[in-house]
Amino acid sequence: MSAQCASNIHTTCAYCGVGCGITAEVVDVDTRQVKIKGQSDHPANFGRLCSKGTALAETLGAENRLLHPLVDGQQVSWESALDQVAQRFMAVIDEHGPDAVAFYLSGQLLTEDYYVANKLMKGFIGTANVDTNSRLCMSSSVVGHKRAFGTDTVPGNYEDLEQADLVILTGSNTAWCHPIVFQRIKAAKKLRPEMKVVVIDPRRTATCEIADLYLPVKPGTDAFLFNGLLSYLSRLGSIDYEYLERHTEGFGSAIKAANETAGDIVTVALKCGLKEAEVATLFDWFRRTEKSVSVYSQGINQSSSGSDKVNAIINCHLATGRIGKPGMGPFSLTGQPNAMGGREVGGLANQLAAHMDFEPEDIERVSRFWNAPNIAQKAGLKAVDLFEAVAEGRIKAVWIMGTNPAVSLPNANRVAQALSRCATVIVSDCIHHTDTAEYANILLPALGWGEKDGTVTNSERRISRQRALLPPMGEARPDWWALCEVGRRMGYKEGFNFQSSHEIFIEHAALSGFENSPDDRLRDFNIAALSDISPQQYDQLQPFQWPLYKQETTGTSRLFADGQYFTSNRKARLLPIIPSLPKGELSEEYPLSLNTGRIRDQWHTMTRTGLAPQLNQHIAEPFCEIHPDDAAAINVEQDSLIRISSSYGKMLARAQITDTQQPGQLFVPMHWTGQLSSAGRMGPLINPVTDPFSGQPESKHTPVKAEAFAANWHGFVFSRKPLEVEGIAYWVKIRGRQFYRYELAGDAAIENFSHWSRKLLLSGVPHEEWQEYSDPSAGKYRAAAFVDGKLTGCLFIAPDSQLPERSWLASMFDAENLTDKDRLSLLAGIPMNQAANTGKTVCACFGVGENTIRNTIQQQQLNSVEAIGKCLNAGTNCGSCIPELQALLDAQ
Ligand code: SF4
């Protein structure tokens, strides 16, 4: 590629499980400038992208990239690093056996990377200690699918969500977490207003924007609700007995359990904390609506009884025969871009490749296919247990790829401690400094999005290509390549001679069809039609939904239309579900239930979205949503700081007082890390209890207490370079376009702010100027540093959190020279140019702030979201900010 060129490349988004297609235009290879837009003919998104996908181009630079292999902090050659990995693994295996080593993978990996990792560990090293962060995301759905269908199958597709007359969104803030799916449902509802949408969630989220019915269910009681629905359907004669008879088994025990645990609406309402009328309406709508889809996500899965909740939902669809047909079915929305691909190659410790299990005939089959006599004979350790084994010293070497368990796992301080004591921690990542990388003995530079080449599978079983747009940065190499190199060094020469992702893909496709003929259809996952495609065909592979059997040219958009499942008798199974409440009793000491989740503009532990300035402006700090009564009880005000503690750990967050949160419940985001905040990690608080079948942690409920954080002072600082702010009780680092911003609060007094801030901001370069304003009696201090008239940093301190707007100060970093008037306004803390005082970003896609929207509504007398869009563009791309635009209109 030349330095200046323009080419359109079709690839797939790096983030959520919607799997949106992207058209990328490489504008300049040297400066890594890329233009991103939605791929108009990709069947997942038809041209739409959410704020995160839209901002992908901002994450392609060199900031915080891991560029070279490092061993014990020293840069080394790849050869040397790979030798070290192989030698350390072999030494541990020789002394302690294969179960003393482990891989921890990620739903961010491509299928080809995942395939090789599983082949190496399960097939050749001989242990199944390979798990993935998908365990934290949707492993309960995997269990639910396998128990009901005999395989891990998502039966339907996104079109079903548009064709349904009733869409039930349960445990899913679809508007923020799967924005393009939400936009598709919303658009369908606009076309067919008679379509009904129900949202079931303890929090009233942005998804309620399109809800005809909102059920603020008590945390963890979903299985009572769906058991109640099954019982209701049975009482009112709405069971499809013919379907049950021909295609299922287990209805008798399932309905008995449902009747006994949730046999009438009064009981259901009581158990779920709902009004009887709300429950009755949901049940009535479901009973009357043939075309019903039940969409669920982490609110169902992340639970100590997540698998049972999934089966309670599936039971209702099987009992009514509403599955495998247009507009009907249970639908699991996966979190990550390739959680499904990981499942397909056996990324979970209790699976083998190509949707096979640790059953003798599967083990034997895979062993034969791989020519791997040392194949693992039993399931390995699931994520939480795997890191507990690291903590206890049973696992002595772990290779972590593309994920950040020191942040994201429950009881995360214990995980960090385990890694700090583990003799060999290898981390493959495209990012250099992460909380997990801090503990690595060996760091291997992985390809970033935009450099990778392979495939991913989205929530509707659609396999799409991720294609390289740019050359690798530094010495970054594909994960599959590093795995093959290590495999060969460990003596497994034959199985790891792959020269390209294409070669891996065709082997993966061949395994899927191995002893799984189109006539027998023993396993659902089958893409054998692609087992002999050429590199060119792989390059040009168009998105398709599996299965794609040999000789077929189009994929399968919907499964189970024929009522044939993948159990031994081809019948689906209904399960008797005895609902249980979340583990962890509330107590006098820990009286509140802590819920966790994603926010609109960030992804996982922010290692990439945190680099995109436009994504950091909507919600800049870790926050805690709290009901007004609970806030009053602990004397917490809006935007003040709150300390949340569980019996495992503590965090600090900004209080957001809101009645969208139920009394007794708190919500915090999952994203902030130790790299970006002093105390914003939620992982350390989370109860490490798990679902007994899936091993998925109970991330939606931990007993906690909340108290006001008594800050001695509050402040913030802007700087063109990163600063050292360690030692301050509360700090959060926020990447802006021309600056880094730090929000600060101290619990101890600072003797001399002038001295302290000069040390922080001045760099001693020529022509540096310093201006300050101090009012010690009011506890106020402001300062600014300039070089050659250009603002290089500024700092504001106050006794409370009432500090100047940040957006206006941020705009000063765009100016080459500040006027005297600007300097005065800076030190006065008052914007002279109101147009620059845009306020907190509401629309991330177009960078439109709250003040701008308020002013425009007022000045132009706007009365609709569409009118705001026409004036400011806000809300016209991904649409995720529309609920906030509506709230601003309502407030006006
Ligand atoms: Fe990416 Fe957003 Fe599409 Fe998810 S919805 S795949 S984050 S663009």
Image (cartoon, grey):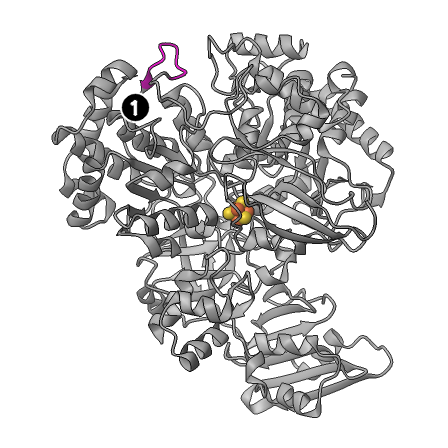
Screen quadrant of the C terminus: bottom left
Expressed as whole percent of the image width and height from the top left, the position of residue 364 reads 58, 8
| Label 1: few (<14), some (14–19) or many (≥20) C-alpha neighbours in 10 Å | many
**Quadrant of res 847:** bottom right
Is residue 504 visible in the rendered image? The answer is yes
Is residue 708 visible in the rendered image? The answer is no
Q: Is residue 235 left or right of residue 748?
A: left
Screen quadrant of the N terminus: top right
Q: Is residue 639 left or right of residue 718?
A: left
Expressed as whole percent of the image width and height from the top left, the position of residue 592 reads 36, 55
Query: Considering only vertical position in the picture, is 163 above or below 747?
Result: above
Relative to the observer, which residue lies in front, 72 or 493?
493
Residue 815 within the magenta-colored segment of the rendering: no
Secondary structure that dominates the magenta span: loop
Relative to the observer, which residue lies in front, 257 or 95?
257
Total labels: the figure holds 1
Residue at the spot 38% in from the left edge and 62% down from the top edge:
626
Q: Please, what secondary structure does the residue beneath circle 1 have?
A: loop
Judge: label 1 CB < 8 Å from ligand 1. Answer: no
Q: Is residue 779 left or right of residue 560?
A: right
Residue 567 within the magenta-colored segment of the rendering: yes
Expressed as whole percent of the image width and height from the top left, the position of residue 389 reads 59, 31
Query: Considering only vertical position in the picture, is 393 above or below 265?
Result: above
Residue at the spot 13% in from the left edge and 28% down from the top edge:
237
Say which residue label 1 marks.
Answer: 575
The kind of residue on which mark 1 rests is Leu
Residue found at the very far left of the displayed protein: 236
**Quadrant of res 813:** bottom right
Expressed as whole percent of the image width and height from the top left, the position of residue 538 reads 67, 27
Residue at the spot 78% in from the left edge and 85% down from the top edge:
769
| Magenta range | 565-572
